[in-house]
Image (spheres, helix red, strand yellow):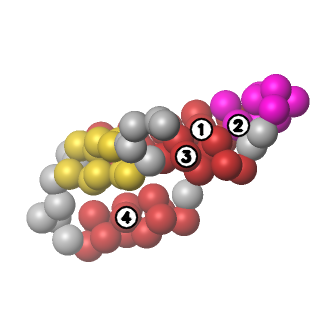
Amino acid sequence: MELINECSLRFAEDKDYRLLIIDSIMALFRVDFSGRGELSERQQKLAQMLSKLTKLSEEYNVGFVESRSPSY
């Protein structure tokens, strides 16, 4: 979330940005949360992050893409 907040500050300062690419955002949630007991908390945190990204996209007219590595 800190990185997303930092991006929003940069978007506010410099209007030249049009695309934000996020690499493997789901990997953070897979590592930090394990097991079904933490599923609810993980889903809430993910929803907060996606909500923040959506607002950022709408406010600054910036698209975002989540890229990920294939699972092996």
Which residue type carries mark 2?
A: Arg
Q: Find numbered disc 2 in the image and state the secondary structure of the residue it sits on.
A: helix
> Could you tell me the amino acid type at mark 4?
Cys
Residue displayed at 87% across by 30% down: 37
| Residue at the farthest left position | 16
Image coordinates of residue 69 in percent, x first then y, are: 39, 43
In this picture, which residue range is highlighted in magenta? Answer: 35-43
Number of other residues with Cα within 10 Å of mark 3, as a class: few under 14, some 14 to 19, many 20 or more: few
Depth check, mark 4 against mark 2: the one in front is: 2
> Which circle, 3 or 4, is nearer the viewer?
3
Q: Secondary structure at mark 1?
A: helix
Question: Where, by quadrant of the figure, is residue 53 drawn?
Answer: top left
Above-or-below relation of 8 to 71: below
Distance between mark 4 and mark 2 Cα atoms: 23 Å
Measuring 67% from the left and 49% from the top, which residue is drawn there?
31
Specify whether 3 is left or right of 14.
Answer: right
Residue 50 in picture, x, y percent from top left: 48, 38
Instruction: Single out the mark in the foreground, 3 or 2.
Output: 3
Residue indicated by mark 1: 46
Q: Report which quarter residue 65 is drawn in.
A: top left
Quote the CA–CA distance across marks 4 and 1: 18 Å
Residue 22, image x, y percentages: 36, 51
Mark 3 — residue? 27
Whether residue 64 is in magenta: the answer is no
| SS label for mark 4 | helix
Per the image, the residue denoted by label 4 is 7
N-terminal of the pair, mark 3 or mark 4, is 4
Task: From the image, tell me which residue sits under label 2.
Answer: 42
Q: Quadrant of the N terminus?
A: bottom right
Q: How many marks?
A: 4
